[in-house]
Amino acid sequence: MSSDWDTRRVARTVLIIAVVLLSVWMLWRFLPALAWAGVLAIATWPLREGLARRGLGKTTSAILLTLLLAVVLVLPLIWLGVQVAHEGHPLAQWLSNVGQQGFGTPEWLAQIPYVGNRVAAWWQANLAEPGAAQSLLGRTGTGGMLNLTRTLGIQVASRLTILVFSLLALFFLYRDGPSVIAEAHVIANRLFGPSGGQLGKNVIGAVRGTVNGLVLVGLVEGVLLGIAYVAAGLHHAAVLALATGVLGTVPFGAPLVYILCALYLFSQSQTTAAIAVLVFGSVVVFLADHFVRPILIGSATRLPFLWVLLGIFGGLETFGLIGLFLGPAIISVPIAMWREGATSGEG
């Protein structure tokens, strides 16, 4: 009898694993959408609970929150697309002029300590000469722009598809989330014991803390540096602020934008404005990356900031953009198991 029971148990386990693997294989292309839905649901779950406490039904709450996030996510994308389309023709014309006439070497470039002469020589050889500039920039005519437009169109369509399925999955997570959480808690306790539920809480805390520490801090960096761009008189300051906010979600990403802005101001002989943007941006990013982010992420995940950084960049390299949030969540599990093992060993 015991042998038959063991056989059925092994067969049941094999069947469960096979079905899970088959489901993952079948839904592989939709996993990013499901992952984004999970991240958004975890990050905004306090809003859902707040609406529930006000007496709104679960379906009504789900509809309201899903529509709110759809507006928050879609409107900036539409605005950015309009801006890119508006600036596309002038950019192509400028690149064409640079290819035909060259782009003169700024006088201040050679004055940069240590590397200035080499950079100026490279600029002169590759951008200042018309033929060299044309070769470096490549073909910027109608064919090149059409290919670029086609590629961007495919990417936009793919991202919109993921966004639509993410919002659809998000609606059902908002509506059925409490029952899903309760069932997951029961299954985790059966599989891993009392510590299973705690591991799940660590993962949720890691995702929520990472969203707060990356997205919110990045948006604040974008707003503050956007004000600096306006004060410095930079054109298209709103687009630059948006780019700063997006790159600011990655630690040390915002400097890529404000340093380029400072270099542009230097090239226009606006030295005071360039130094102001560079110094202000460095102060904002230093405070955000060394003080605000460790507090927001570390307090939620109880992870040292080094492990948070490793999780962020490792997740980004492995899973793409969604890895920014999955990485720290994954890292939080072995760290929690390590701490539990150390605590039980002391006991």
Image: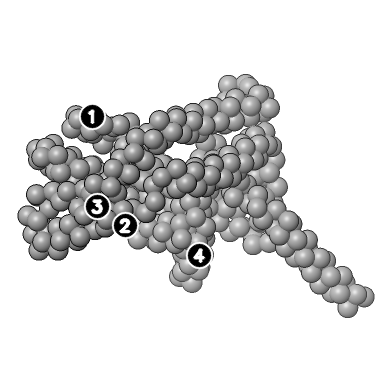
- Do callouts 3 and 1 mark residues in contact (Cβ within 8 Å)? no
Residue 334: image tag: 4
As drawn, 70 above or below 202? above
Regarding mark 1 in the picture, which secondary structure is present there?
A: helix
Q: Dot 3 corresponds to which residue?
A: 130
Judged by depth in the image, the label closer to the viewer, 3 or 1, is: 3
Mark closer to the chain start, 3 or 1? 3
Q: Earlier in the sequence, mark 1 or mark 2?
A: 2
Residue 276 is at least partly visible in this image: no
**Which residue was labeled with disc 1?**
230
**SS for callout 2:** helix
Q: SS of the residue at dot 3?
A: helix
Work out whether 342 lies above or below 102.
below
- State how far apart marks 3 and 1 are (Cα): 33 Å
Q: Could you tell me how far apart the alpha carbons at marks 3 and 2 are, in whole angstroms? A: 10 Å
What residue appears at the point 70 percent right and 58 percent down from the top-left corner?
A: 24
Q: Which mark is residue 197?
A: none
* Residue receiving disc 2: 136
Label 2 crowding class (10 Å Cα cut-off): few <14, some 14-19, many 20+? few
Q: Amino acid at mark 4?
A: Pro
Give the amino acid at mark 2: Leu
Q: Residue at x 84, y 74 (%)?
A: 6
